[in-house]
């Protein structure tokens, strides 16, 4: 048995693969570091979902223990995130899949922000605020985090070619609403000014791609 599975707490598992779990864990750490976002109050948000693409050879050898390995990688990634005092929205998860076009011994790791569904506000009133387009389309914002982007998995999806797949996040609490740009390709402007992270007020306008959104209070 190799040293790598032992260090990851996978005693008794013989992966017999060219890709080692600790190499994947290191790549996951780099992805978290690369894709971290600074939120209001100096907090650092990192992705909570990681996908691991393997070659046919390595995937075949990981497959019998893929669930256990994925769980252990998620546990170790969660420990790393806690050590760095970073935050996540939603549980840490790892998905292992067969990726096309990879040579034996190579792998591909990607990280995504996939928050849990927002919790309803107290008193049963789900929306604490609303985003409204110039055409009048409205999206309610509940307590929690909302991912805005072009991706089909985004909480608030905009079919705008100037919007990145995961363009920005909106964090809603009882005290504030903050916006953080996720290193989007075309950036985000609030009230005409480029921003990285900013606290929003009712009446503020958010420009992403060719779309303008106005924040309205729930009342």
Image (cartoon, rainbow, N blue to C red):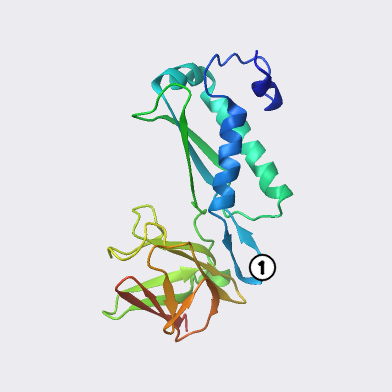
* Residue 47 image position (x, y, % from top left): 54, 51
Callout 1 secondary element: helix
Q: Which residue is depicted at the point 63% across and 31% down? A: 72
Q: Is residue 218 above or below residue 97?
A: below
Label 1 crowd bin: few (<14), some (14–19), many (20+), radius 10 Å: few
Which quarter of the figure is the N terminus placed in?
A: top right
Closer to the camera in the image, 28 or 149: 28
* Residue 115 image position (x, y, % from top left): 51, 54
Q: In the shown orientation, is residue 115 left or right of residue 5?
A: left
Q: Which residue is depicted at the point 54% across and 40% down? A: 93
Q: Which residue is depicted at the point 55% across and 73% down? A: 178
Say whether residue 9 is visible: yes
Name the residue carrying label 1.
42
Could you say which quadrant of the image residue 98 lies in? Answer: top left
* Residue 3 image position (x, y, % from top left): 68, 19
Residue at the extreme right of the image, as rendered: 83
Could you say which quadrant of the image residue 162 lies in? Answer: bottom left
């Amino acid at each position: 048995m190799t040293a790598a599975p032992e260090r990851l707490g996978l005693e008794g598992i013989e992966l017999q693969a060219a890709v080692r779990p600790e190499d994947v864990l290191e790549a996951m750490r780099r992805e978290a570091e690369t894709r971290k976002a600074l939120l209001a109050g100096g907090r650092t948000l990192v992705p909570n979902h990681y996908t691991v693409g393997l070659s046919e050879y390595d995937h075949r050898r990981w497959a019998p223990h893929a669930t256990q390995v994925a769980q252990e990688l998620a546990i170790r990634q969660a420990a790393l995130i806690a050590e760095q005092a970073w935050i996540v929205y939603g549980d840490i998860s790892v998905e292992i899949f067969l990726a096309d076009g990879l040579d034996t011994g190579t792998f591909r790791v990607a990280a995504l922000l996939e928050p849990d569904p927002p919790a309803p506000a107290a008193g049963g009133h789900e929306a604490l605020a609303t985003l409204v387009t110039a055409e009048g389309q409205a999206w309610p914002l509940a307590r929690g985090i909302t991912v805005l982007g072009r991706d089909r998995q985004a909480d608030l999806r905009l079919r705008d070619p100037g919007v990145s797949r995961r363009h920005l996040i909106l964090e809603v609490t009882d005290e504030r609403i903050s916006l953080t740009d996720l290193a989007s390709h075309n950036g985000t402007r609030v009230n005409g000014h480029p921003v990285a992270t900013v606290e929003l007020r009712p009446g503020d306008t958010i420009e992403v791609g060719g779309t303008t959104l106005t924040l309205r209070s729930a009342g």
